[in-house]
Amino acid sequence: MSIGEVLAELRVEFPDTTISKLRFLEAEGLVEPSRTAAGYRKYSWDDVARLRFVLSAQRDQYLPLRVIREQLASRDAATAAPVRLVAVGPTQEGDSRLSRDQLIERSGLDGTTLAEVERLGLLAPIAPGRYDADALAVATAVAGLAAFGLEPRHLRAFRSAADREVGLFAQLVAPLARQNDPAAQARAGQTADDLVRLSQQLHAALVRVGLREALGR
């Protein structure tokens, strides 16, 4: 993606974002887009996700760049380390390597909606044309929400919230994940599982309470 395309993508959620702001965040080392042969910036969806994380942390948590940089470093370390990630949905080997057509068939999404979901960064293939169980879980949830009239563009907030949680939880998991001790690696995996489970529990409870209040019940 070009810097102009990234700006258009981010302005939907962060309307005050400017090209100067994106260049500043790059200069601060918070994102490192690749360059084309002609020297133009070329952003990946991972770069866009990092920018979304940074902008959300600034706007919603008023965090300074120093703290955001530390959170990103912790998240990167946790991602690079061989931490066992929690599996959502089917865990059989056959289910963890789905083709695009299989993902569409099992989730109930159509191809156009799946492309939009990928464009928004809500899910991504683990390899060209191959998807895992987490992608199936996301796609199935998106299809279910679509039945209530919610389009993928309405779900950006979920991506932003998840990015913020990852930044927070990575600080807890990364110190364990960086150790070579098998016991520490096991604790890192269990900690990741527990954090995901508890965050899901908290999120569900907060949404239920909020809906009751909104409906006056």
Image (tube, rainbow, N blue to C red):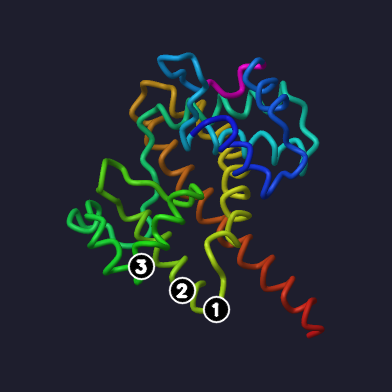
Magenta stretch: helix, strand or loop mostly = loop
Front-most of 183 and 41? Answer: 41
Give the Cα distance between marks 2 and 1.
7 Å
Residue range in magenta is 28-32
Between the residue at mark 2 and the residue at mark 3, the CA separation in whole angstroms equals 12 Å
Q: Secondary structure at mark 3?
A: loop
Q: Is residue 208 left or right of residue 78?
A: right
192 versus 37 height, above or below: below
Q: Choose mark 2 or mark 3, whichever is in front.
A: 3
The residue identified by callout 3 is 110
Tell me the amino acid under the disc marked 1.
Phe
Report whether 21 appears left or right of 31: right
Question: Do the CB atoms of the residues marked 3 and 1 lie less than 8 Å apart?
Answer: no
Residue at image position (68%, 44%) is 11
- Residue lying at the far left of the rendered structure: 94
In the image, residue 85 lies in the stretch drawn in magenta: no
Say what amino acid the circle numbered 2 marks. Gly
Secondary structure, mark 1, is loop
Does the CB distance between marks 2 and 1 fall below 8 Å?
yes
Residue 53 in picture, x, y percent from top left = 62, 38
Task: Give the crowd class for mark 3: few <14, some 14-19, many >=20 residues within 10 Å.
Answer: some
Residue 128 is situated, as x and y percent measured from the top left of the image, at 26, 42
Q: How many marks?
A: 3
The label on residue 148 is 1
Give amino acid for label 3. Asp
Q: How far from the left and from the top, in percent, is residue 84? A: 36, 40
Q: Which of the pair 55/182 is nearer the observer? A: 55
* Disc marking residue 171: none
Residue 144: mark in rendering: 2
In this rendering, is residue 58 above or below 60? above
